[in-house]
Structures are given as structure tokens and as C-alpha cells.
Image (spheres, coloured by chain):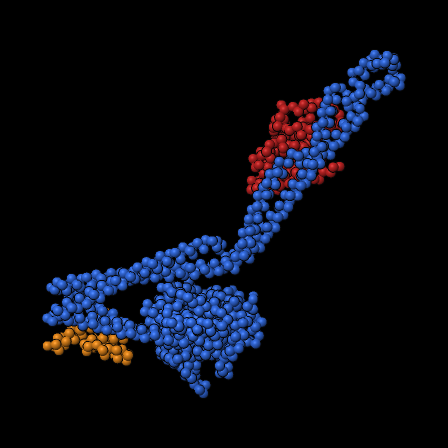
Chain colours: A orange, B red, C blue
Amino acid sequence: MINEKIVEKLNVYSDEVRELAMQAIQLSESFPEKAIADQLQGIVRRLAKQQDGDDQ
Amino acid sequence: MRMDGNIRVHTDAMYKELYNNMKNNGVIEDFHELFFLCACIGYRKGEHAAIQKRDDRFWSRTITPKEWACYYAMIFEKSNFDYEKLSEDKKVLEIVERYANAGVKILIEDFLEDYLLPNSNNSTPQLDPACCRGLPKQFVHFIFEQAEMETWDR
Amino acid sequence: MILHSMTVENFRQFRGRHVLEFYTPSMGQSNVTVIFGENGRGKTGLFRAIIFCLFGERRLSQDGDVPLEELQLVNVSALADNPGQPIRTVVELKFTHREQTYHLRRAILGMQDGDRVIEEEDEKSLFLITADGNTKPVLATEIDAVINNILDRRVKDYFLLDGEKIERLTRASIEQRREISVGIRNLLNVDALEIAIKAVGRVAKTLDNELSSSSHEDLSRLLKRLGDNEEEQDNSKNRLEKLADEICLARKEIDKTDKALDEFKEIRHLLERRKSLEQNLQEMERQAVDALSEMRNLVCKATALIMAPTVITVFEHIDSRKQKGELPSEIRRDLIERILMEKRCICGNEICEGSEAYSHIIDWLKRTSDVTTQDAALNLWRYMSEMRHHFSDDADLVEKRLQQYGNINSSIGNLNHSLENVSNQIGTSERQDATKLDVHRTNLQKGIIDLEANAQNIQSQLENLQQENDRLRALLKEEKLKVGKNDELSRRSILAHDTQDALIDIHKQFTSEIKDLIGASATILFRELLDKEGRENLRTIVVNDDYSLQVLDRYKKPFLANISAGQRQIMSISFIAALAIIASPGDKIEIPLFMDTPFGRLSYDHRRNLINKLPTLASQWILLATDTEFRRQEAQLLKNSGRWGKFFMLRPSSNGNTEIVEQDISSVMAVLRNEED
């Protein structure tokens, strides 16, 4: 469970940033750094595409 | 009473090492000093002893006038004031040698024993180098104490 | 949490079983316990016992880098007295937290194995004591979670305010900043956030690496420059860390030297006395050598004195003959012989053999000597006369020298005896010259100044590098955006970096908020502990961005450099206590607060405020004090506060062990020192 305060503070950022950040924090509660980074690669790719789609 | 400087003065051969040790360890400056002390001790204690094995020790030229005067006094007193006994310095010294021979034994018994190598006392007394550090000091002290023990009208 | 009792068995220097009862409900508000004993008796050891029992941990923050093997818990003499046998070390705690009573027990088994001691976990148990007195066991697997809910292990050290920690925080130094940043980090409990920052950073770096090998030249170049910049920043940060470590070590060495010098202060007068005695002894020995030399010069005279009676006798004999005219004879012997031979006197009268006159002449003849003999006698008389003349003076001189030598020897003996006494008082600890320690200390200080200057330079460099980094990142972002319109890789990179920046920003906000919270909490306490004069001028404690502490005056200007040592100590106590308050769930320190020798430089007013305030702030206050720290004055203040519950003395017993003796509060004064002592 992510700290409520963190969630609150993330609200000022873009959706993509917010989602990536929350995913990173959630994963951090259970996994080591390298494993988290590997998983985040996929999430970043998806979100970047999403961003591109939105822009378009 | 010419204070002849050409006479060889003797001690017993067994004390040769002791004389050497005493000089080498800085307890005495020269042999005549030790000889003089032993002679005075022997004389004042009224003891003399013939030398078993005569051994040259030093020349009489090293004897100081004061020491000569004391030797003459010894012989003169002991001979019941016979001047004849003082005529030949060689004979004077022969008698003094006997006093010194007794005196060195007394010196060892009363003082030097603690400074000798163990078991060397009866044969050839030798100083134990390990004990010699304080000896010069103690030696002087001993002489002074002997001097203090003598009484006369001052 | 209120500690009711603690039992230690074969724990550290506590051989056998010892029970300390801190609190019973009948004691009401008397929540202050004083544990009193010399250094090394085990005061901090009791706090260590609590931490061990609660968390199974041996290490306290003050242990630094001491290897775990050296933090032995099993009593040494118990091991020594039972070779080959395992020794059980036990700590039990009975405490209440939020109306629930707990009985916690933890044990290890220790055994000597050659040179080392092996310690293994033996048992742990936790029971909940219900209101009706029944006990309910907690599963072994859940014990740690239950305890962690009561007190988070990461903040455990906040409940021991030890003297060194207080001291460290008074100095504006790298260690102070480290201490504070670690403290705050522990409080934040943002591990997950920090891991997330690093993980996202890793993603961003991977993407940048991919970008740098792409065909976009400007982008590649910028990435390379950024990479170089970050590498340089990392190197500088490493150098800074190393410098900080070196400075820390140097300060520890200074502390060690100061402690040694402090010991010297106590024995300084003895050292001075010893030096003076040694100088006197040297002088006396020199005089002894001179005296001996003078005595040596008198050896001949002294030996001659042995012959004094003989010399005098001889002199008197000859002298009497002189007096009688026999020496030299009034009439020469050869003349008398002629008279006898010629039987005629010089006056011309005949002298007959056998006549009276003839007898007289024969007597004369007998009394006269020949010339040679007369000369000899007269010479002897002269020698004896001269010697005799000097005997008195020589004897006086000999006596004087003997006495002088004796006095000098006696003085030497007395000096040696005094030296021995003084040396025994100084002790047999390693003889270090106080001067050398001073020099060592000065060199260390100089070293620290150099290191800090170096660190300052590196810090400036880092700031410049960071500015450059920000500039490059901005350029890079622009470039990526330019490229990113058509390039997905760039977009991913931008996203990763933006997310990392966001998380870092949030981390900073948290840190800033907690710093403000600590500052505010510390300020409240600070103002309550300060004396009147301090309160008038000193207003606020602030934790700076670089984690250093600052005190603002009434004009909100930085004033730390001008405050006294006592005020600094109050400042650090306030800060550490504020950490403890924030680490506690409520607005009070819910965990027993252990305070180690806090009174050092405090004025009477500060001490009084501390004694009055802290028991109200914490659920329990356990004061660890030495005899120089806790005297009748402090005891009276504590008595007056109405909060004093218990007093335990830690006394040495045999083989380096300590026994715990409870003393009734009413009779404590008798064992305490006065301020003048």
C-alpha cells in the first residue's frame, strides 16, 4: 500500500509520470532494485506509446 | 728514611687479581692506595701475616711522602722507638707488606666479601663485575668509617 | 511503554541473576529511575540489554564499526569458571504498552571455543498478560512484528541519549550533519520511495545509453557530456564521503586524546610534582657524584687518619726527647766519646772510670744518637708534626664530607620514596607524555581543518557540477523533445527522467517537512529547558538543508556561533528528544528514555529545567549517571520534582563483574558527593 501522502503529492504530475512512479513504489515494497528496473522498462514503453497516441 | 723509590713492593700472588680488579673498576687510582689502606688496617688491628707466595705489585716510587711517613711511624712505634729499624727502607717495606697482607684479609672479611665472585674468596678473590657499580662509593664510605672509628685527642 | 522490571542473567558484566524493578502502579507519577555507577560498570549495558531483549540486536549506534564478535553478551567470568560448559544469557522484560502488559524473554547460549566465544540464539518468548492475570503466548514467528509495532527498531537508538551523541551534535561538523541526516532518514521510513528512485534512475540510464549509441549526434554528444558530468559528480561524492570518514576518525582520535588529557588534568598536579621530584633527584644525584668525587680526593687523608693514634704517639715520643734536649743532643755524641776515651772533660779535669762523673757521661752517651739517627729522628718528627697538624682539620673535613654525603643519600632516598608514592598515585597506565598528547591533538586539529577545507572545495565543485548537470539536462530534454516527436526512445527516456525527478522531489518534500517538524518540536523543548537568559534571546532551532543545526535569535538571525557550551548541550538534548518524540506515535515519548550523563556543562538552572521537564515528556526517564554527574544537588532537584521513583547502584564485585544494589531514595544523600567534593 502506497503512502497516502505520496499519492497526494504525485497528483501535480502528468498521468504517465504518476502511474510510472506509483508502479515503481509498489514494486519497491516487494522486489529488489534491478528486478524493479526490468519490470519498469515494459511499463515505460507502454506509457511512452500511450503518450504518443495522446499527442496524436 | 730516604723514601727510596727503587724498591719493588710485594703482595701475596693470590691478591693480584683483586688489585687489578679494584683499579680497573675505578675503586682505586693506583695500587699503592690499596696497599696503604690494607697496611693501616692490619697495623691498627695489630695483625700481620707472612706472604705465602710473594708477587711484585708496584714500585715504591709511587708511594707518597705521607704514606712513607705512616710506614715509618708504624715501624718506629712497633719497634719501641728504635731508630735503627728505620735505617733501611727495604726492611721497612718488608714489615709493612706483612701488615698489608693481614689487612687485605680483614678488608675482604669486613667489606669486600659482598662484592666478590662467589667461591673466589678462599682461592683468588675477584670482584664480581655485576656488583661493582656501587663499589667505589661504598669503598670511600668504608675508609671514612674506619677513620672515624679511630679516636685521639683532637 | 512503561518498563516494570528487567531481569538480566549472566549478561555482560552482570554475573548471575539480577532484577531491577523500575516501576509499579502504586508509584503513580514517580517515573524516574537513577542508575548510578562509575564508568564501565554497565550503565549503558542495561540499555543494551533492553534492545537485545526487544529486538535480539547487540549493536547500538555508538558501537560504530566494532565487529559483532567483539560485542559479546555472555558474562566472561561465568564462561571462565565453567570451561567447556555453555552459559545461558537471559534478559527478561516486563512492560506495559497502551494498557497491555507484556512479558518478553530472550536468551542466548554462549560457549568458549578456543580464543573466541560462540553465541547462539537459544530461546525467545512473549506473553501477553491479561487483566485477570492469565498469560497468553505469542507465536514465535509473530514476536518480532508485535514488538516492531510497539517500537520500530530503526529508531531504537533515539531512546538512548548518550553523552557522546549529545556532544557530537553540539559541533557544526560533518559528523553532526551525518548524525542528523541518518536520524531523519530513519524517521521518514521511506525505504520503498528510495528504492523506487534508484530503480527508475536505472531505467533512465539504460535508455540514455541506448540513445547515446543512436544516430542523433547532438543527443549523443549531450548524453556523453552528461554521463561524464555524472561520473565526475559520483567521484566527487565518493571523495567527499571518504573525507567525511577521515574527519570522523580524526575527531574520534581527538576525543580519545581529550579523554587521555582529561585524565591528565586530574593527575596533572601529580605529574608536575613528579617532574619536580625527578628534577630534584637529578640534582641530588649530581651532588652525590660531586660529593663522592670530593671524598675520593680525601681518600689518602682519610686513610692516613686511621694511623692518627700512631702518628701522634710517635710525634709525642720524639717531641719529648726534643723537649729534654736529647734531640738534637746538646752535646755531640762524638765529643762525649772523645771525653770518655781520653778520660778528660773539656774543662781539663780527669774523669775516672767508675766515678759519678763517669756515670753521668755514660748516661749522656746513651741518650745521644749519632748524627744520622738524629737526622732521621728529626725528619720523622717533622713528618709527624706536619701530619698531626692537619689531623684535626682533616678529621673535620672527613666528618663533614661523610655527613654531607649521608644527607645527600638520605635526600635521594626520600626523593625516591616520594617518587614511588607519586608514581603509584598516577597509576600504571601507559605513560604518555601530556605534551605529546597536546601536540598530537594540535596536529589532528590541523589535519581536520585541511580536510574540511578540502571538503569545502569538493562541495563547491559539486555545486558547480550540479549546475552544469541541470543545464545539460535541460539541453538534453530540449534535444530529446526535438527528436522525440519522431523517436519513441527519446520519449521513453524523457518519461523515465521526469518520473525520477518527481520522486526525488517528493523525497525532498518529505525530508523538508520532517525537518520542519523536528525543528518545531525541538524548539518547544529547547525553550522549556533554557534558562531565563537563554529564553530571552534564543528562539528557534532549525535543521538546515545540509542537515546542520542552527539556532535563530529573536531577530531570526543565525546565532549558533555565539551560544555557550551549556546552551549547545541543551540544543542537542532538545533535538535528540524531538527525534524520540516524533518517532513515538503520540506527542509524548512513549518509550523509556535513557539519558547518559547529561549534566556535564549545564548550569544549575539548565539542570533544574531538565530534571523538571523530562519526566513529564517521557513515559519513563532512566538516568544513567556517575558520581561526578549526580551529586546531592541533582538528587535534591529530583526529590523536589516529586518524580523520583528508584535508585540503583552498580557496584563492582569480583572478577570485573557488577552487582546491582537498590538503595532507598531517602538514604541516597549519604552516598552522594557534594558539589564542593
Whether residue C279 is situated above or below residue C168 in the rendered picture: above
Asked where in the image residue C670 lies, by quadrant, the reply is bottom right
Left or right: C114, with B136 as reference point:
left
Q: Nearer the viewer, residue B130 or C665?
A: C665
Q: Nearer the viewer, residue C28 or B88?
A: C28
Asked where in the image residue C365 lies, by quadrant, the reply is top right
Left or right: C654, with C96 as reference point:
right
x, y (%) of residue C535? 44, 73
The residue positioned farthest toward the front in the image shown = C555
x, y (%) of residue C665? 55, 76
Q: Quadrant of the C terminus of chain C?
A: bottom right
Q: Nearer the viewer, residue C315 or C99?
A: C315
Whether residue C336 is visible here, answered yes or no, is yes
Residue appearing at x 38%, y 65% in the figure: C172
Whether residue C624 is situated above or below residue B73 in the rendered picture: below
x, y (%) of residue C39? 49, 66
x, y (%) of residue C590? 41, 79
Left or right: A9, with C559 as reference point:
left
Residue appearing at x 40%, y 56% in the figure: C444
Q: Nearer the viewer, residue C564 or C504?
A: C564
Residue appearing at x 67%, y 23% in the figure: B2
Residue appearing at x 35%, y 66% in the figure: C178
